[in-house]
Amino acid sequence: MHRKTRLFAMPASIALEQLSEQLLKLGRLSREVAVADFLGQAVSVVREVLDFPRGWWGLGTAPGEGGVPAIHQVEYLGLPSDFAAEWQKIVSMDSYALDVSNRVGEVQCYVGGDNVGLPPEIIEFDLRYDLHHAMGLSLGDGVTGHGFFIVAYRGQGGAPFNAQEAVLFRHLIRHVIQLWHFALQDALSASEELSCALLARPDGRVLYAGPELCELIFTHWPEWNGIHLPPAICAHFDHLPSKMRVKENTIKFRAKDENIWLTYGRSDQQDFLLSPREQRVAHLFAKGLSYKEIARLLNLKPSTVRTYLRDAYLRLRVKNKVELGDRLDGNAAQRQSP
C-alpha cells in the first residue's frame, strides 16, 4: 500500500514577516558559526516556527529501481545514532521515503493513523520511534543524484503538518542549503571546487561530501558506508597537512577549525582523463555488471551508462571489457613504478 502522501500547493499568502525574520536569523548565523556547526543550528532556527521533536537531515543519493539510497552525511534530532542504518533496512518498502527521495524540490507530508495495508515492518518502525506525522524535502543535483534531504516528525500527540508549514519549510530549507554551500565554499580556496571536497571530523565522521569525491571514494572503497571515512583515509589525519595517492588522483588533507578538509585533483599525467563518475561506471562494467545493473545501482539511465563507457573506451584507447579492466588496473601500477 502506498502511504497517503500530501503535496501542498502554494497558498495565496503566507506569514511573510515570520519568514523574513527567520531568514535574517539564518543569514546572521551563517557568518557567526563554524561551517561544521551550521546545519544543526540552522535547523534550530527553523524549529522556532515549525516545531518538531524528531528529525534527520544530510546528504544522500537517490535510489535506482529497487535500490536503497546511500547516505553520505547525517545529523539527528531526537533520534538514535543508528537510525540511518535501521531506516535503510525498511526504506525499499516505504513509499513515503521514496517519494521524498525521488520528488526533488517538493515538500512531502503524510498524516499518521491509517496503517491499513502497510507492511508490518513500516508500522513497527514508526511506532518504535514515534514517527506519526512527517514532512520531508530533498534538494539535489539531478545529474549526479547527490543532494540534501531533511525529514521532520511529530509523534502521536502532535498535530499534522499543515499547508502553511509546508510552504515555510520549503522556503527556509532552500535558504539554509544555499547559505551552507556559500559557507562551505568560503572555507575553500578559490581554486578548489565544492564537488571535489569533503569535510570530516577528526574521528572520520563526514560533515559534507561533494559528489565527485564521493564517487572517487566509492570506486576504490566500495564497502564505504558513506557516513564514516574508510580507515585507510583516516590514517592520514595524524600527520597534517598530508597527501594520499588514490590511483590516478591525489587527495590532499588539511586541518581547519578542528576538522579536516579533503580535496582532490588530478595528477599531471594526462593519459587517464575519466571523471570520478566515469571511473566508477568503468570499474563496475569491468567487474562484469551490465548496463542495466549499473544504471539501477547508480540511479542513471542505461543510455547515460553507455555514454560514460563510450567515452571511457575512447579516452583510454581500449576495445573491450578485458582491455578496460587491464587499463584501469595498469594505470595504478604504472604510476607506482619508479
Image (cartoon, grey):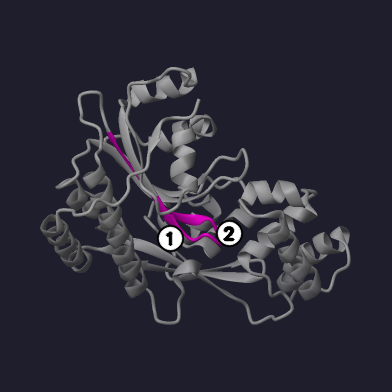
Q: Residue 60 carries which label?
A: none
Q: Main secondary structure of the magenta part?
A: strand
- Please state the horizontal and vertical placement of residue 272, each as a whole percent of the image: 72, 74
Apparent side of residue 249 relative to residue 230 in the rendered image (left or right): right
Depth check: 84 or 291 in front? Answer: 291
Q: What stretch is highlighted in magenta?
A: 138-153
Q: Which mark is residue 238?
A: 1
Write the residue at 71% across / 54% down. Answer: 302
Q: Which residue lies furthest to the front in this view?
A: 12
Apparent side of residue 84 relative to residue 14 in the rendered image (left or right): right
Among the 4 quarters of the image, the one containing residue 268: bottom right
User: Per the image, is 150 magenta?
Assistant: yes
Label 1 CA crowd tier, 10 Å (few <14, some 14–19, many 20+): few
Write the residue at 74% across / 48% down. Answer: 292
Depth check: 149 or 269 in front? Answer: 149
- Label 1: state its secondary structure: helix
Badge 2 amino acid: Glu
Q: In this view, does 36 lie above or below 86?
A: below
The answer to whether the residues at label 2 and label 1 have Cβ atoms under 8 Å apart is no
The residue that disc 2 covers is: 215
Going from the N terminus, do you reach mark 2 or mark 1 first?
2
Apparent side of residue 206 relative to residue 301 in the rendered image (left or right): left
- Label 2: state its secondary structure: helix
Q: Is residue 67 above or below residue 230?
A: above
Q: Is residue 156 above or below residue 309?
A: above
- Please state the horizontal and vertical placement of residue 148, each as a whole percent of the image: 41, 54
